[in-house]
Image: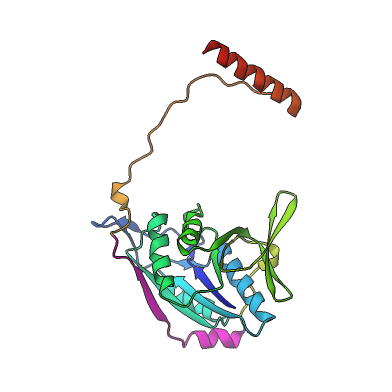
């Protein structure tokens, strides 16, 4: 099995926010003092992949880490945990706020490489707090999607992914190429690297791959406009009592509205 991890990193909130600007092309420019670390969801995805490899000799873990500020430090952080390969992923142009465009860039790149059996990505890839890149990437690749993954185990030779939904736990037995967006959980807390691997990672050099597209450019930030404010009209009525009483009140309200119409 080949597992491919897409990691992005987030701004390190332990330090003051670095300078940001929008250039003439409508892209973000960051100062050279920016600090970026792996997000909890990046760490969770990485730990899940490493755990799956721990118990199977035929599992290969490859990492694509989004380029940008502080990328050398991040690459070394990941390399110290000894995945089979670590490469920097450069998006040209990088328009992470345009999820559809970013998904197309990454999908075009992956289409030219060996198809991974399992693609793991932090649920907020790109630090935009929305999770749409994972959904659109799965659609473009034609992969099944299992969102908010919290844990993964082997059941014989079959991979089983798990997540919690309310008071229940849901599972999926993978039967084909799959993209899993990962959230953090006590079971996937990232391990600490061995000190010898940390020192070895400091001497490593890393290959880079570029994901671009010939089909136009992403949505420039300068073209975005503030959302139009719409005042809500009408009155609000709070439905009280149990579900049955609320349903009766709602039915009576709808009938009344139809009569008035």
Work out which quarter of the rendered image holds the N terminus and state it.
bottom right
Q: How many dots with numbers?
A: 0
Query: Taking 216 as reference, is 208 above or below it?
Result: below
Task: State which quadrant residue 26 falls in.
Answer: bottom left
Residue 110 position in % (x across, y down): 44, 71
Is 218 situated left or right of 5 in this image?
left
Most extreme residue toward the left, as rendered?
24
Query: Taking 202 as reference, is 219 above or below it?
Result: above
- Tell me the residue at 40%/32% (across/down): 229
Query: Taking 21 as reference, is 233 above or below it?
Result: above
- Tell me the residue at 28%/59% (across/down): 216
Is 165 situated left or right of 128 in this image?
right
- Tell me the residue at 70%/24% (across/down): 246
Residue 23 position in % (x across, y down): 26, 57
| Span of residues in magenta | 194-215
Is 223 situated left or right of 146 in this image?
left
Residue 47 position in % (x across, y down): 62, 72
Q: Nearer the viewer, residue 118 or 123?
A: 118
């Amino acid at each position: 099995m080949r597992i491919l991890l897409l990691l992005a990193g987030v701004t390190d909130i332990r330090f003051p926010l670095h300078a940001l600007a929008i250039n003439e092309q409508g892209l973000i420019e960051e100062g050279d003092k920016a600090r970026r670390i792996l997000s909890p969801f990046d760490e969770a995805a990485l730990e899940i992949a490493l755990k799956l490899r721990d118990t199977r000799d035929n599992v290969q873990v490859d990492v694509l880490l989004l380029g940008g500020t502080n990328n050398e430090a991040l690459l070394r952080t990941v390399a110290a945990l000894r995945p089979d390969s670590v490469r920097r992923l450069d998006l040209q142009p990088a328009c992470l706020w345009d999820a559809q465009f970013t998904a197309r860039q990454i999908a075009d790149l992956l289409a030219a490489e060996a198809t991974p059996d399992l693609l793991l990505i932090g649920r907020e890839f790109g630090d935009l707090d929305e999770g749409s890149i994972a959904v659109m990437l799965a659609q473009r690749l034609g992969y099944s999607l299992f969102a908010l993954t919290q844990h993964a185990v082997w059941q014989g030779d079959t991979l089983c992914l798990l997540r919690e939904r309310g008071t229940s736990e849901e599972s999926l037995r993978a039967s084909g190429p799959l993209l899993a967006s990962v959230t953090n959980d006590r079971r996937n807390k990232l391990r600490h690297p061995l000190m010898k691997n940390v020192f070895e990672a400091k001497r490593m050099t890393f290959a880079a791959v570029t994901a671009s597209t010939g089909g136009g450019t992403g949505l420039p930030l300068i073209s975005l406009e503030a959302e139009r404010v719409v005042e809500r009209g009408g009155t609000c009525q709070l439905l009280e009592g149990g579900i049955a009483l609320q349903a009766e009140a709602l039915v009576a309200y709808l009938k009344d509205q139809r009569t008035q119409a």
